[in-house]
Image (cartoon, rainbow, N blue to C red):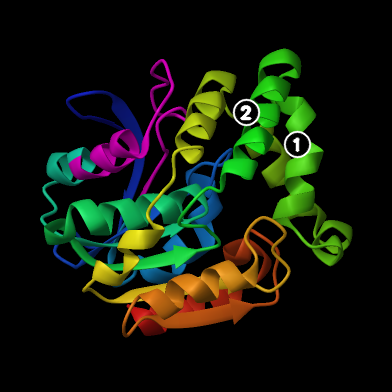
Amino acid sequence: MLIQTPKLRLNVVDEGPRDAPAVIFSHSLAANVDMWAAQSAALATRLRVVRYDTRGHGGSDVPDGPYGFPDLVGDVVALLDALGIARAHFVGLSLGGMTALGLALEHPDRVLSICVANCAARTAPAACAMWDQRIRTARDQGMQALVEPTLARWCTSAMIERRAPQLAMLRQMIAATPVTGYIACCAALKTLDYLDRLSSLALPVMFIAGAHDPAVPVCSMREMHDLVWGSRYVELPSAHLSNIECEAAFTAALEAFL
């Protein structure tokens, strides 16, 4: 369903008992709410589970870019307000994990806990050139040109070889991402800079890393864990999409944390 907020409409899947604690799921760049289907199914029997498409993705509106993390975080706060949720658990992977960090830092009064998977807390200057290249590819060749390179980062070779149905879903998801939204969110990723503030977090935090993630090295995830007092750290034998490649282990870690 589409939820109207003051700035845009967000595509939302809202499941589970309305009087239960809420958990919000935020997906990666070039993905949508379908990325979290397994975790939603596992949790929605006893929690209110809200999945939303990030601005510029899926069925949500695609405002002109560039976007910044204040926009992405502000959208979450507006969504909570629209749904009448005072505070929620928040689970994010990659771009969604960065959004989780921003939400916890800027609006701690709206957050019960955060689960931060497969993401960095700062974009190094050298990485900005990489994002510029992906922006050019999307603009000049369309999202189809990014499908296979993205899958190579998202999944291990074993997953690519053996799990055809999931790969088909991921290919469709990447290809269907609006070019404007992809480029605008890439611009946000170039501005990411939360690392120096992580030690101020004072709420339950769990970090989930992929041991074979080429996009976010394990050492980066461990560094964040070391900076956040009392945080949990889980490492799974996955590439970037740990919640899909290691679906059962990811979901079990999340259930135990929540």
Image position of 27 with respect to 231: above or below: above
Q: Point out residue 192 in the picture as x, y percentages from the top left corner.
A: 44, 45
Amino acid type, callout 1: Val
Residue 90 visible within the image: no
Image position of 86 with respect to 8: above or below: below
For residue 167, side relative to residue 59 (left or right): right
| Quadrant of residue 8 within the rendered picture | top left
Mark closer to the chain start, 1 or 2: 1
Q: Point out residue 244 in the picture as x, y percentages from the top left corner.
A: 62, 62
Q: How crowded is mark 1: few (under 14 residues within 10 Å), some or many (20 or more)?
A: some
Residue 152 visible within the image: yes
| Residue range corresponding to the magenta coloring | 51-77
Q: Point out residue 180 in the picture as x, y percentages from the top left corner.
A: 53, 19
Judging from the image, what secondary structure is the residue with disc 1 in?
Answer: helix
57 inside magenta stretch? yes
Number of the front mark, 1 or 2: 1
The C terminus, quarter of image: bottom left
The N terminus, quarter of image: top left
Image position of 162 with respect to 204: above or below: above
Depth check, front residue: 6 or 129: 129
What residue is shown at x 73% (from left), y 43% (from top)? 150
What residue is shown at x 51% (from left), y 56% (from top)? 37
Image position of 229 with respect to 36: above or below: below
Which label belongs to residue 147? 1
Q: Residues within 10 Å of mark 2 (few under 14, many from 20)?
A: some
Which label belongs to residue 176? 2
Amino acid type, callout 2: Ala
Query: Mark 1 to mark 2: distance in Å?
Result: 10 Å
